[in-house]
Amino acid sequence: MTLRLVVPKETWTGERRVALDPSVAERFQRLGAEVQIERGAGCGSHFGDAQYEKGAKLVDDIVAALAAADVTVRVQPPSLEEVEQLRDGSVLIGFLAPHRNAEVIRRLRDKKITSFAFELLPRISRAQSMDALSSQAAIAGYKVALMAASLASFFFPMLTTAAGTIRPAKVVVVGAGVAGLQAIATCKRLGAMVEAYDIRAAAKEQVESLGAKLIDTGVDASGQGGYARELTKEEIARQAEVLARHIAAASAVITTAAIPGRPAPKIVTKAMVEAMKPGAVIVDLAAETGGNCELTEPGQTIEHNDVTIHGPLNVPSLIPVHASETYAKNVFNFLSPFVKNGELALDWNDEVIAKSCLTHDGQIRHEPTRKLVG
């Protein structure tokens, strides 16, 4: 039986990405799958309906298409109403935010839907080409660097003018994960002097390879899977004292620190902001989960003590063409090994499948989510 793969239009406010771009839709078709995409689904990413005609069937009645779908691919988590539209026992792939969507996860379980969350993808070498978290974080890191340059009241590069030489801006990037490293690289390309802060000692080599300097606070909080663990109160006080001095001298601060499934750690305090020079800017990429700065208002740009604090949301969606293209490749690399002769054959002995599965056969397979849902 031919695999029916359906891509609905994203319904989250402001979401411009699409789960499959035209080229990846064609690749799935060549594997023998029947790809159906809701008419207009790619318009936000500048992929017109005509571009999909070679590799997919355009559908007007998405409810009927989902009711017959074997696999549904999305970017953002579905609403409860959208879960109800899915065929019982079908497969769902996308970002599912299990730590904050208990009702949705419970309903996926009850409908015996096999759901795969990109947030749960194991951090192993073989899964790098499937890692949608990393691909979208890299895009976000690039964009927030441009935001910081745009909002700052200073030139980023050194300029020699008839009126004299303008020294380059100093930028502090907090968090040297995928997004932070991309922000560092972009700020360096723009000519800024860049310092980075990360509580994982392993970040030093990566930061320095990009031409930036790692701020040494004497605290190492390397955690499992390449993520940082939470700091103790004593460690927070120690790193805050050192970090405050560097932030006070910065023209721009970009914060990217995140802990999966938990609120963003508060790193930049109100006192630190008030010690910054007039005209400086903070761009808080962690605004979606509460922000790394105490004063961040998610989705808003505010001023405090003559310092601009910007809390952007859904940053990858602001570069929808490349965000959609890379996301679609992540989906293909995740799913295609299990499409045989036009049919889906999931291998539950495969680490990628086993660990990224959220719900299957009426059960929640991810233990932390199972405890959350109850």
Image (tube, rainbow, N blue to C red):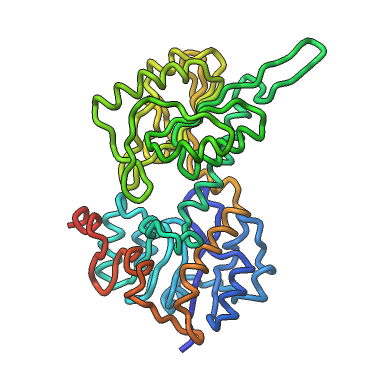
Residue 346's place in the image compared with 212, above or below, is: below
Q: Which quadrant of the view contains residue 344? A: bottom left
Q: Position of residue 139 (x, y in %)?
A: 56, 47
Q: Is residue 59 left or right of residue 176?
A: right
Q: Residue at x 48, y 59 (%)?
A: 128
Q: Residue at x 61, y 21 (%)?
A: 169
Q: Nearer the viewer, residue 172 or 103?
A: 172
Q: Position of residue 141 (x, y in %)?
A: 54, 41
Of all residues shown, which one is farthest toward the right? 162
Q: Residue at x 41, y 22 (%)?
A: 243
Q: Residue at x 36, y 65 (%)?
A: 83
Number of numbered discs overlaid on the protein picture: 0
Q: Position of residue 257 (x, y in %)?
A: 41, 37
Q: Which quadrant of the view contains residue 288? A: top left
Q: Nearer the viewer, residue 57 or 131?
A: 131
Q: Position of residue 181 (x, y in %)?
A: 52, 40
Of all residues shown, which one is farthest toward the top? 163
Q: Quadrant of the C terminus?
A: bottom left
Q: Is residue 51 left or right of residue 142?
A: right
Q: Nearer the viewer, residue 90 or 244?
A: 244
